[in-house]
Amino acid sequence: MAEMLQGFAGTSDDQEFYLLSPPGYKIGATKYVVVLGSVISGVGKGIFSASLGKVLQDKGLAVSPLKFDGYLNVDAGTLNPYRHGEVFVLDDGTECDMDLGNYERFLQKNLSRENYLTSGKIFTMVLDKERRGGYLGKDVQFVPHVTGEIIGFLRELAVKQRADVVLVEVGGTVGDVENSYFIEAMRELAYAEGEGNVCFVNVTYIMEPPSTGEQKSKAAQLGVKRLQGQGIQPHVVVCRCPTPLEQKVREKVSVHSNVPLARVIGLEDKRSIYEVPAHLRKSGIDQEILRILHLTGKDDSVPAKQWEGFVSRVLQPKHEIVVGITGKYTKVKDSYASILHALEHAGASLDAHVSVKWIETTEIEQGASPDDVLAGVHGIIVPGGFGKRGTEGKIACVRHARERRVPYLGLCFGFQMAVAEFARNVCGLQGANSTELGETPHPVIDLLPEQHGLAKVGGSMRLGGREVKLRAGSLVQKLYGSSTVRERFRHRYEVNPAYIDALTQKGLLFSGEAEGIMKLLELPGHPFFVGTQAHPEFRSRPLEPHPLFVGFVAACQKTDKSGRAAGRDEVRAVQAGD
Ligand code: GLN
């Protein structure tokens, strides 16, 4: 049946089918796991999917994730991190949902634009194709054309990334208007691929209202019914809950959803998200999913053990350090998700737990002393940012770090603020600043050449991976342990070349550059003062912590509570493991 359908590629006017099949696509060669959420959003679908991907990958399967976002934004670059969480940047420059960060971290591989789809992207594809005459003679409809393009997109991904399993995470919750046509596309996908090739997983939520004192599954049952009403019978139900799932609740979900008991599992809140892969293995759901998809997996004990080693270092740290992070979005932890993960990875590699003190820099601007606001932190990070609010406070934090010899890591905007601070307070260039923040007599940070006269906002920054050349003998070159590195970027402004001499004469070392643009800086003689125009946080992985974060956390470990930092040699000794 499935093979027959594939023949109907929608070439004739009277075909009801519009199923795109890229060259080389073979039904059954790639299996699909489709993860759909119900009851509430933010239930942990992304972490579940990434963990499942990791477990399948450990069994020797090539897993390609795809996140679908219902927004009409073509990519996530124009979303507000305060509302939506961090904008994650892939090596190919795609600005996407932060869930892709979880996939990269769990699967330990780079993803690309093929792994991310929004409504905006699909509609742009469909409308462009319509204008090019791609549907000539047809009335272009949601079904089968939009849904057909989605299936085509998934199949392209399967072929291009030679996936054994494509893992589709449908953003939002079943019942949302914006993802309904996408869910319909998934129903059609299962029809077209045939029995045993698509596995639907419903991640739902079990409530525990304090007034009842017990777990309640009614909302979860209704969620499954809603899915069934859309033509999808889940094969697996994952019940997220604050505490371990009670057996009788599990049975209730099973009976009401038509899903065998072995395929209904609980997933209670964990201390660390990295515990979820082991939980899935223990529940046996990995084997159930292999069975549903007629797949076999090889022994996964070696990679599983490696991962568990990391998890136990996360859960049983020997040291505690406190890092102050400044930021405009300090109320929403999600806006800095990758930085928090990078600190966690680096911390685990040094047996340290990193806790964060969020620094509201506007307090400093309103008169609070940086000494008070930053008391007790072992290191300071000024992360990426846009716009003026709180920037004078950020510059005051950089000054504090430089003068008090507190370890400093400036990320993108934090790199630019370090340049402005040095220009003002060391080079005597009063009022030096970035032109992003308004008029300045000393525009030490200015627009990148290609940004002048650019009218378009979306997707127009310098984006994605670039090779950075590192200066021989610099601290960063030692930390990276190589002379070139590939880092990811997302910026519009750069160090103004006209000021490079003035800055370097006073002792600022630009220790990395790409395409003639300064990408890394450091202060020789300071225990750890490093800034980068890049976003190294996007490249940190649990088992491969990022060298700059490792260097920073190691330096923080050598800072005492008063903020006094150790000398640079001592820091190197910590990094060398002495
Ligand atoms: N706003 C700065 C720029 O566009 C920094 C960007 C960032 O921190 N990602 O260059």
Image: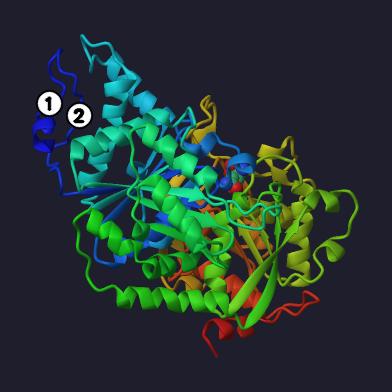
**Residue at 70% in and 70% down:** 322
**Residue at 85% in and 65% down:** 371
In this view, 145 is above or below 56: above
Residue 553 visible within the image: yes
User: Between residues 316 and 500, which one lies in front from this camera angle?
Assistant: 316
Q: How crowded is the residue under tag 1: few (<14 C-alpha within 10 Å), some, or many (20+)?
A: some
* Residue that numbered label 2 is attached to: 19
The image quarter in which residue 60 lies:
bottom left
Residue 207: percent from left, percent from top: 59, 51
Q: Are marks 2 and 1 in contact (CB under 8 Å)?
A: yes
**Secondary structure type for disc 1:** loop
Q: How crowded is the residue under tag 2: few (<14 C-alpha within 10 Å), some, or many (20+)?
A: many
In this view, 151 is above or below 8: below
**Residue at 77% in and 61% down:** 399
Residue 514: percent from left, percent from top: 45, 53
* Residue that numbered label 1 is attached to: 8
Total numbered badges shown on the rendered structure? 2
- Residue 245 relative to residue 115: left or right: right
Q: Give, as a three-letter code, the residue at label 2.
A: Leu
Screen quadrant of the N terminus: top left
Q: Residue furthest right?
A: 367
Residue 81: percent from left, percent from top: 60, 42
Q: Is mark 1 within 8 Å of ligand 1?
A: no
Q: Which mark is residue 308?
A: none
Q: How is the image coloured?
A: rainbow
